Amino acid sequence: MFNEISLLVHLLIVGKACYSVFSDTAGIINLNLKKSESYANGCVWNVYTL
């Protein structure tokens, strides 16, 4: 079992080809932001606890 989710996010605007990262979850997941770092290339690293 895990208690953290680490996501590296980059803003990308797409049309009909977009999809939800968490589309297969059974319900609502309560996440608390633990850490966030921004990078010069536009990426943001977010770490969440469950």
Image (cartoon, grey):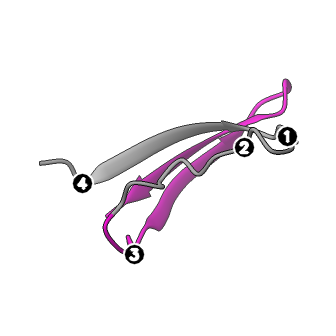
Using the image as rendered, state which of residue 1 and residue 18 is in the foreground: 18
Residue topped by disc 2: 18
Give coordinates of residue 10: x percent, y percent: 75, 35
Residue topped by disc 1: 14
Q: Earlier in the sequence, mark 1 or mark 4?
A: 4
- Residue at 43% x, 68% y: name it: 31
- Answer whether labels 1 and 4 touch (C-beta < 8 Å): no
Residue topped by disc 4: 3
Question: Does 1 sit left or right of 4 as displayed?
Answer: left
Residue topped by disc 3: 28
Image quadrant occupied by the C terminus: bottom left
Q: CA–CA distance between discs 2 and 4? A: 27 Å
Q: Earlier in the sequence, mark 3 or mark 2?
A: 2
Give coordinates of residue 2: x percent, y percent: 19, 48
Mark 2 Cα shell of 10 Å, populated few (<14), some (14-19), many (≥20): few
Q: CA–CA distance between discs 3 and 2? A: 20 Å
- Answer whether labels 1 and 2 touch (C-beta < 8 Å): yes
| Nearer to us: label 3 or label 2 | 2
The boundaries of the magenta stretch are 26-50
Q: Earlier in the sequence, mark 1 or mark 3?
A: 1
Give coordinates of residue 41: x percent, y percent: 84, 24
Q: CA–CA distance between discs 1 and 2? A: 6 Å
| Nearer to us: label 1 or label 3 | 1
Q: Looking at the image, is 28 positioned above or below residue 42?
A: below
| Nearer to us: label 3 or label 4 | 3
- Disc 2 secondary structure class: loop
- Disc 4 secondary structure class: loop
* Circle 2: residue type: Cys
